[in-house]
Amino acid sequence: MNLIKNKKIFIFLFVIVFLYFFLSFFVAFSAFSIGDEVYESTPESLGLIYEENDILTSQSSLSTWWIPNNSDITIIMLHGLRSQKADQEILDKIAEFNNLGYSIIAVDFRNHGKSGEGDFTFGVDEVNDVFNTIAYYRDAKDLTRFGIWGFSYGATTALLTGLDFDQQNLGVEIVGIFAESPYMDLLAVFTDQVAYRTPLNTAMANLLKPGTVLLSNLIYNFEFNSVQEKFDSSSGIGIPTILISCGNDEIIPEGQIQDLQELLGISSNIKEFNDCRNHGEALESNSEKYRSLFSSLFDLN
C-alpha cells in the first residue's frame, strides 16, 4: 500500500512540475514571439515623398524610410514591440512630425517589418540598429543633427542609445530624445504583458516567473534583468530627454517611469498625460500639449 501511495505522490508531483515548466515555456515563447506579418503601407498613402533604403549590418539588415523636409534636424522614429514603421499609428506620427517641419527617418527594428532577423534583446543590442542607421544617413545624406522619438520598446532603445552615444564617436549630434512610455524593469512589464496577452492572470504569471526566467535564459540566452542593469550602471544621460508618462497605461507599471527618471538624472524630465485611455495614446489625449513638448525639445530655431 505504501508503495502504491508513494507512486501516486510521485506521479502527482511529476505532473505538477511538468505543467509548471510547460506553462513557463508557453509564457517565454509568448514573450519572444514577435510575428512575421509585414504591412505594405507607405508614407505615399499620406501624400508624403519618401525614399526607401535598406541598411546591411553585421547583425541584420534594416529597412528604413527617409522622408525629407527643410530642416537641419532629422527625427529617427523607433516603433514599439511587435509593431513596424508601416503600422498606421506610426505612419500618422510620421505625417504629424513631418508637418511640424522635420525630416524623418523611420526604422524597422531587426525581426520587425521588412528588416532581417537578429538577436532579440528588448532594446539592449537593438541600440546598434540605431547607431547603424545614424552612420548610414550621416554618410548617405550628410546629416549631422538627429533627434530620436521612440515608443515603448523603441523608447527604451532610444534611452539606451543615449546612454551609449558618447562611446560611439559617430561625429554627429543627438539634440534630444522623446521617449514615450519607456520601460526599465522588464520583469515587471513582462508579468503584466503575460496576463494581458495570454489566458493567464497576474497571480499565475507571477508564480511562473522563476521558471520563465530560467527557460528564457536557457532557450533564448537572455537575462531579463539586463535592461535594468544597463540603466542601473549608468551615470545619467547627457542628452535633453523627455519621458512621456501615460495615465491608464496597462503595460508600464505605475512608478516605473519615475524610477527611470531618477537614474537618468537632471537632463531628463517627466511629462504626464493623465487622460490617456491606454498605452500609447498620449498624442490623442492632448495633441496640443504633445506637439508643444515635441517642438520645444527639437527646436528648429
Image: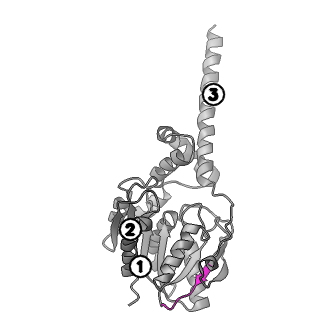
Task: Tell me how many marks there are.
Answer: 3
Q: Is residue 70 magenta?
A: yes
Q: Mark 2 belongs to which amino acid?
A: Asn
How many residues crowd mark 2 within 10 Å: few (<14), some (14–19), many (20+)?
some
Indicate the quadrant containing the C terminus: top left, top right, bottom left or bottom right: bottom left
In the figure, 259 relative to 97: above or below? above
Q: Is residue 292 visible?
A: yes
User: What is the spatial separation of the Cα atoms under label 1 and label 2, in whole angstroms?
Assistant: 21 Å
Residue 90 counted in the magenta span: no
Q: Which residue is mark 1?
A: 176
| x then y, percent, for residue 230 | 45, 63
Q: CA distance from mark 3 to mark 1?
A: 54 Å
Residue found 49% across the figure and 66% down from its top = 151
Picture disc at residue 286: 2
Q: Name the element at disc 3.
A: helix
The residue beneath circle 3 is 14
> What is the C-alpha distance between the residues marked 2 and 3?
54 Å
Q: Are marks 1 and 2 in contact (CB under 8 Å)?
A: no
Picture layout, residue 94 above or below residue 228: below
Which amino acid type is marked by label 3? Phe
At mark 2, the secondary structure is loop
> Where on the picture, by quarter, is residue 276?
bottom left
Give residue 255's position: percent from left, percent from top.
35, 55
Compare marks 1 and 2 and give the one earlier in the sequence. Answer: 1
SS state under label 1:
strand
**Residue 240 at least partly seen:** no
Q: Residue at x 60, y 19 (%)?
A: 9
The magenta span reads 65-71
Mark 1 or 2: the one toward you = 2
